[in-house]
Amino acid sequence: MRRTLKLILVFLSFLALVVLFLLTIFWFRNRAFLGNPEEEFMGYLDQNQFDFNSQKLVKGDKLPFFNSDFYQNDIVLLGEIHGYADVQEIDEALFIHLNKTKGTRTYLIELDEAGAAQLNKYLSTSPKDNALLESAVLKLREVVPQQAGKQWIQKWSNLYDYNLNLPTSAKIKVVGLDWAEHQKGQGLSRDEIMVENFKQAIQNEGLVGESFYGFFGLMHVLQEKLPNSDYSYLAARLKKEGYTLSSIVCLDVESEVYLPANDIMPITPKDGKTKLMSMNGPIILLKGVLDFMAITQPHSITLFNLNKSYSPYRVKGIEKLHVRINFIGSDIQMVSKEHCPTDFTQYIVFMRGAKPITPLNE
């Protein structure tokens, strides 16, 4: 009996050492990927940052922080990793800013035409019809469950109030680009369908010559193909169609995200919230994240312009903004021999300590 117990203890000790060894290797591997803060990038970021403050954005003045083409381009796209409450406020403020500064009234959304129609009906119905908004968020939950929460509802309630004071010719118009059920068997990819729906909406809704703002998942707003991939996302396809674009990508550290169980993450905490998905590890790692962290404060939201003429992010092949994803999915590498990070996105929203979406049932 003693001999058996001793063997069990030896085995458990050996197993613990193996696990500790593997964790140590994993930690050093991640740390080596992140590297160290670099003075050149820190200095540039320090000179080209904007402390996010929705009141400043919604005052209606053009900001020198943005390059001039930001106000001239046909489309501005905001891309997020779904599930963060803070992004809803960012989305609302950016859209209102563009509405006031350049008259953008068309909001492109990651919903199909029917979902967008529900939001348009909500915006045009007086008094507020909360049942319509709840119907729209339930439609959203079928497509982007991480986004379907109380902050999303609050955002659209705020946009309803803002829309009330706009003249008829400037009222908010929501256009859904996502594929409907009948479009999924056409042999086209989701992003191809989005482009076709966009072009059709321009003709059908009389939107020729207008400017547009859109809010989508991060990958959809990247303006070039990822290295070693033949797939083009929405922004890259729109760019190829001849539209001019500005892309803004949301990145985060030290944050908590709402991530209900799905095909990629079949096992999540009971409440669907986790702190394990921040971009400073352990699952997701952002190359260059330490540069951003070195000049920002905890619990802050900062906008960065990466695309000034003297930006070090405009160098082809520079190893920055490469997102390594451990265990799940594939890396997102916004750099290649042919492209620099600013070919993929021109602005970064860097969130520290972001909060998760509050589910509808809480």
Image (cartoon, grey):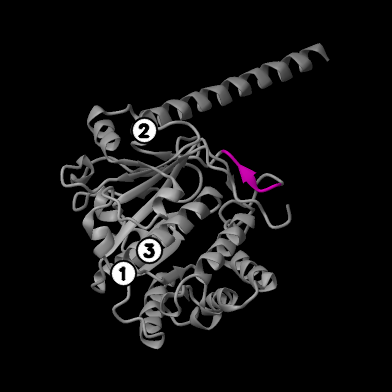
Indicate the amino acid at tag 1: Arg
Is 203 left, or right, of 358 in this rendering?
Answer: left
The extreme right residue here reads 1
| Whether label 2 touches label 3, CB < 8 Å | no
Give the residue number, with chain letter if any, for mark 2: 33
The chief SS type of the magenta part is: loop
Instruction: Looking at the image, tell me whether mark 2 or mark 1 is earlier in sequence order.
Output: 2
Q: Secondary structure at mark 3?
A: helix
Decide if residue 212 is on the left or right side of residue 137: left
Q: Is residue 158 left or right of residue 11?
A: left
Residue 306 belongs to magenta span: no
Choose between 259 and 2: the one closer to the eye.
259
Nearer the viewer's eye, disc 2 or disc 3?
3
Q: Earlier in the sequence, mark 2 or mark 3?
A: 2
Amino acid at the residue labelled 2: Phe
Identify the residue under disc 3: 100
- The residue under label 1 is 237
Q: Which residues are magenta?
A: 271-275
Residue 161 location (% of width, % of height): 56, 65
Q: Nearer the viewer, residue 185 or 120?
A: 120
Q: CA distance from mark 2 to mark 1?
A: 31 Å
